[in-house]
Amino acid sequence: MKAMIFAAGIGSRLKPLTDNMPKALIPVNGKPMLEHVILKLKAFGFDQIVINIHHLGEQIIDFLKANNNFGIQIFISDEKDYLLDTGGGLKKAQQFLQGDEPFLIHNADIISDIDLKKLYDSHLENNPLATLLVSQRETSRYLLFDKSNKLCGWRNRETGEIKSFYPYFDPSHYQEYAFGGIHVLSPQIFDWLQEWTGRFSIINFYLSVCAKTNIRAYVAEDLHLLDIGKPETLAQAEEWMKTGMGKLENIY
């Protein structure tokens, strides 16, 4: 099975840690966050992984070589010259991901106890263009889904900004969920991406096409998930792994 890890982020929220190290190599409980994600993907049967790189990307290449690619096939999508954001990064990696089977995308700075095989199998069963891991986690920005778990819009609670391509969109009629930075995509995604170029967000792309195709929520109950791209959650992740809080004790 194929997967992609988004590891090209600059990591500005983690400065000064990222001044001399790419964010994906910052250690969490003794291992780089990238290693945690690779081992999780490998444990769930993903044996072909593409990783995009940008800031201090050579360090990631050297790290993978030193660990013999953790015994699986790993490809590099090089964005060192120009950072493409999540949507542009996905499109640049097309050569590694196109084919007949769906593939999973996982942010390098996400740790969770999600069963990736169940998420992947749910995508196979429902066959949407994309299946997004979501939960009722507290955040400022939410994806909005209808009663059939189909993506319809986005809202920023702090600013009041709303995005939707549906006319007369009323966010109060939809379910709010926080996106977990993990999603499964059908290879047909690249047909929809043909007209998109340069740097762009995958979420903005989803919002632009969700009225025309099925972008589906996978609602995870009792999910333990942390975005470790900022100092306070990085410290919390260390504590999780050291003390075995929640369900994470057996995941890493």
Image: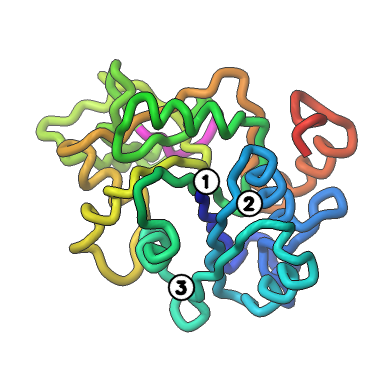
Residues drawn in magenta: 138-143
The residue furthest left is 167
Q: Mark 3 points at which residue?
A: 83
- Comes first in the chain, label 2 or label 1: 1
Q: Name the residue under label 1.
A: 1
Total numbered labels: 3
Q: Name the residue under label 2.
A: 109
Q: Residues within 10 Å of mark 1 (few under 14, many from 20)?
A: some
For the residues labelled 3 and 1, the Cα–Cα distance comes to: 26 Å
Q: Residues within 10 Å of mark 3 (few under 14, many from 20)?
A: many
Query: Regarding mark 1 in the picture, which secondary structure is present there?
Result: loop
CB-based contact (under 8 Å), mark 3 and mark 1: no
- Comes first in the chain, label 3 or label 1: 1
Residue drawn where x is 79% and y is 46% of the image: 235
Q: Looking at numbered disc 1 in the image, what kind of residue is underneath it? A: Met
Which quarter of the rendered picture does the C terminus lie within? Answer: top right
Q: Residue 163, how many percent across, how many down? A: 26, 42
Residue 250 appears in the rendering:
yes
Q: Looking at numbered disc 3 in the image, what kind of residue is underneath it? A: Leu
Residue drawn where x is 35% and y is 21% of the image: 175
Say if the magenta span includes residue 140.
yes
The foreground one among 123 and 172 is: 123
Q: Residues within 10 Å of mark 2 (few under 14, many from 20)?
A: many
Say if the magenta span includes residue 126.
no
The foreground one among 158 and 222 is: 222
